[in-house]
Image (spheres, coloured by chain):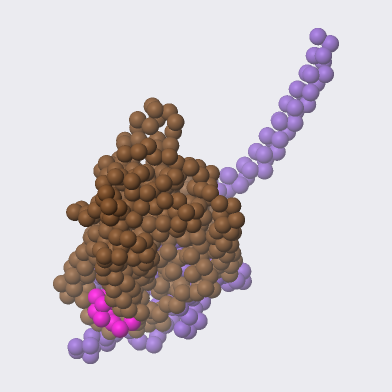
Chain colours: A brown, B purple
């Protein structure tokens, strides 16, 4: 393998234009948050029935994706896969950026965002939410340390590279377990209360994160016209296909488990066969667009010679992922809380009725701002830190990715 | 050595300034600290860990359409809910329950059930959701960050989020409310601590709400519970609510 050289992102006009656009979106998100904070949540679509709304969909997606973004680095460091090693720096930095974007959305949606200091100083250790605050902060520290061991010029520091990478990998598994458990441990609600949510969220993080990483990496390399091998993109695309399938497996088992128990059949009927927005988002958004199509695309013949199928598959994985998280978070609350199983109930507080929810404009802006912030941090970082390998051409990354004729080698394994 | 005198003078001036500043700080802060300390200890002193406050709701006496308990709670704690508003708070509500198979129907009030094992307290990241030693579950409005995780976790839909600013003239000192925080039935803790009973129990002219100490076998609530069957809503969850119902559908 050739020695990998890293350099700062090129470009001036394009770079500043990208920064300006992303900054404007992030700024709009801050304005939206200020508007919601100033007037109260009454100006959002959220109610006392749908207490977590669109900001949470974006925040949870990004937080879950963040740990998945780090997988690219982990595959190189922990599992010693050669083609992934050059991407370790960008992967680690982007993981931190995506987590920051997600947390920004989460924190700005609090009823009292001004009390963030309280959340940082007062802990109820029985709360998985409190544990997550530690896990998020720890993720920043561990992944930045990992990045430092990758980038340091000192041999002594670099010798801890594998140890730091392994720690980061274990940490991210625990972190996503924590995020999944936020929902999995909600014993009272029909749509949650599933232990499988923890591993399911880990599987989802693999696909969400890799999709986001592919989109950003391909965009960056194409925009500055640095070499990017089809073999490498194809290989990562195929891995995305495996991750998408793994995520689908866990989602399927979660629903089958609920379908088997008579007490949960109501919520399953509502989500899977209710003919509502959640049914559409599940079948069309997650299953068709987020699973079947990406899987077919990344294993298609054209994915060997073109970036396009992998880019479209990644984009669809993100859309499918957002759809699924929407179904989990909003759909889970839209289905009425069951106080009296098997009985018909009515009250002035909307007992027994399907709770309507329509995302408001500020909520969507805040959510999208999370994405913008994540990409903004990543793009800015590539300009000030040597994170991007000068060349990701197949012959520079791993000669096994190219045949003598220049065609992509048939991959026996996806990773 | 000639420079020592001015230096010493500067030091003295500095010392004097610091002394005065420190005195001023103590004089300014101390009463507040003392008050706060007194306030906390005063509230804590009223909590008797030997007690377990609870309610028995005799649903055979509760009628559909009667909402005196709800009206009393509103008046006592300074909240209001416009009909059909999905964002207004409801600390207590009347729920009409019907068995579709038998046609049997009943009406009952549902509020915070003051669980022995409250999921809202478990999930609260800051500890704002708390349980007093006497079983009353409250929200500490000083450290509630408005994350609404407790609302996700509550099996009884007992909690509300203040979606907008609470008008000053509607606030009452014993039930602080504020935009961006979560709120719920306090079991009228201010009345209970003063030896009284919750406003809902007092307002029910049918005597359907009995309040008392579940740990005291001589209390009316304990006697009734010992005599007649009673139930907890979603008892299967194991939260062991302090609010019991004499009959459930």
Vertical order, A22 against A320 (above or below):
above
Check if residue A25 falls in the magenta segment.
no
Residue A339 place in picture, x, y as percent: 29, 74
Q: Residue furthest top?
A: B1
> Quick check: can you spot residue B174?
no
Residue nearest the viewer, comparing B126 with B188: B126
Residue A385 place in picture, x, y as percent: 50, 42
Q: Residue furthest left?
A: A260
**Residues in magenta?**
A267-276
Residue nearest the viewer, comparing A311 with B8: A311
Q: Residue furthest bottom?
A: B103
Question: Could you tell me what secondary structure mostly forms the magenta stretch?
Answer: helix
Check if residue A270 falls in the magenta segment.
yes
Asked which quadrant contains residue B199, the reply is: bottom left
Q: Who's the residue at 44% across and 31% down the image?
A: A153
Q: Who's the residue at 25% across and 81% down the image?
A: A273
> Quick check: can you spot residue A405?
yes
Residue B195 place in picture, x, y as percent: 44, 62
Q: Quadrant of the N terminus of chain B?
A: top right
Vertical order, A344 against A240 (above or below):
below
Residue nearest the viewer, comparing A193 with A303: A303
* Drawn side of residue B210 relative to residue A389, left or right: left
Residue nearest the viewer, comparing A58 with B209: A58
Asked which quadrant contains residue B11, the reply is: top right
* Drawn side of residue B116 relative to residue B175, left or right: left
Q: Quadrant of the C terminus of chain B?
A: bottom left
Residue B14 place in picture, x, y as percent: 75, 27
């Amino acid at each position: 393998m050739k020695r990998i050289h890293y350099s700062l992102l090129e470009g001036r006009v394009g770079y500043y234009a990208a920064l300006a656009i992303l900054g404007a979106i992030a700024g709009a998100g801050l304005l939206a948050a200020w508007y919601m904070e100033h007037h109260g949540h009454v100006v959002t679509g959220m109610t006392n029935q749908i207490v977590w709304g669109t900001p949470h969909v974006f925040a949870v997606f990004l937080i879950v994706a963040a740990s998945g973004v780090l997988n690219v680095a982990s595959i190189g460091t922990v599992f010693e896969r050669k083609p992934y090693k050059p991407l370790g720096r960008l992967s680690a930095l982007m993981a931190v950026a995506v987590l920051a974007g997600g947390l920004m959305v989460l924190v700005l949606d609090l009823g009292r965002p001004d009390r963030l200091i309280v959340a940082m100083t007062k802990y109820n250790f029985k709360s998985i939410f409190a544990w997550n605050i530690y896990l998020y902060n720890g993720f920043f520290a561990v992944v930045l340390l990992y990045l430092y061991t990758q980038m340091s010029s000192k041999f002594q520091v670099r010798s801890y590279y594998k140890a730091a990478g392994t720690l980061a990998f274990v940490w991210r598994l625990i972190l996503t377990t924590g995020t999944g458990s936020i929902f999995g441990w909600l014993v009272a609600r029909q749509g949650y209360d599933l232990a499988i949510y923890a591993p399911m969220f880990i599987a989802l993080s693999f696909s969400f994160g890799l999709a986001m990483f592919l989109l950003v990496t391909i965009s960056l390399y194409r925009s500055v016209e640095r070499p990017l091998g089809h073999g490498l993109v194809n290989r990562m695309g195929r891995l995305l296909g495996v991750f998408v399938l793994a995520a689908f497996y866990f989602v399927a088992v979660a629903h089958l488990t609920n379908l088997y128990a008579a007490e949960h059949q109501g919520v399953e009927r509502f989500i899977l066969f209710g003919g509502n927005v959640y049914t559409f988002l599940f079948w069309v958004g997650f299953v068709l667009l987020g699973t079947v199509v990406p899987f077919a695309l990344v294993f298609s013949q054209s994915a060997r010679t073109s970036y396009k199928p992998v880019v479209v598959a990644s984009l669809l994985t993100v859309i499918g992922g957002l759809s699924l998280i929407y179904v989990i978070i909003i759909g889970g609350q839209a289905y009425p809380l069951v106080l009296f199983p098997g009985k018909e109930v009515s009250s002035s507080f909307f007992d027994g009725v399907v709770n309507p929810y329509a995302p408001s404009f500020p909520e969507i802006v805040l959510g999208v701002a999370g994405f913008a912030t994540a990409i903004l941090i990543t793009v800015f970082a590539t300009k000030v830190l040597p994170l991007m390998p000068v060349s990701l051409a197949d012959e520079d990354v791993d000669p096994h990715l190219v045949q003598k004729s220049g065609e992509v080698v048939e991959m026996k394994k996806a990773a | 050595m000639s420079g020592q005198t001015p230096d010493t003078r500067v030091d003295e001036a500095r010392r004097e300034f610091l002394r005065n500043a420190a005195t001023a700080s103590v004089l300014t802060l101390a009463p507040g600290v003392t008050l706060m300390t007194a306030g906390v200890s005063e509230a804590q002193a009223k909590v008797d860990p030997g007690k377990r406050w609870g309610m028995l709701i005799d649903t055979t006496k509760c009628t559909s359409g009667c909402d005196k308990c709800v009206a009393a709670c509103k008046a006592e704690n300074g909240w209001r809910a416009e009909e059909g508003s999905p964002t207004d708070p409801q600390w207590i509500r009347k729920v009409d329950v019907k068995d579709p198979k038998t046609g049997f129907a009943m009406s009952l009030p549902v509020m915070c059930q003051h669980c022995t094992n409250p999921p809202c307290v478990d999930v609260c990241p800051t500890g704002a959701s708390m349980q007093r030693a006497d079983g009353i579950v409250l929200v500490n409005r000083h450290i509630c960050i408005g994350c609404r995780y407790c609302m996700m976790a509550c099996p009884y839909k007992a909690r509300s989020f203040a979606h907008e600013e609470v008008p000053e003239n509607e606030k009452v000192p014993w039930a602080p409310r504020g935009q961006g925080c979560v709120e719920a039935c306090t079991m009228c803790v201010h009345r209970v601590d003063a030896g009284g009973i919750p406003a809902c129990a007092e307002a029910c002219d049918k005597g359907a709400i009995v309040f008392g100490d579940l740990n005291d076998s001589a209390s009316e609530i304990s006697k009734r519970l010992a005599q007649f069957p009673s139930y907890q809503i979603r008892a299967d969850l194991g939260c062991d609510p302090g609010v019991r119902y004499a009959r459930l559908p």
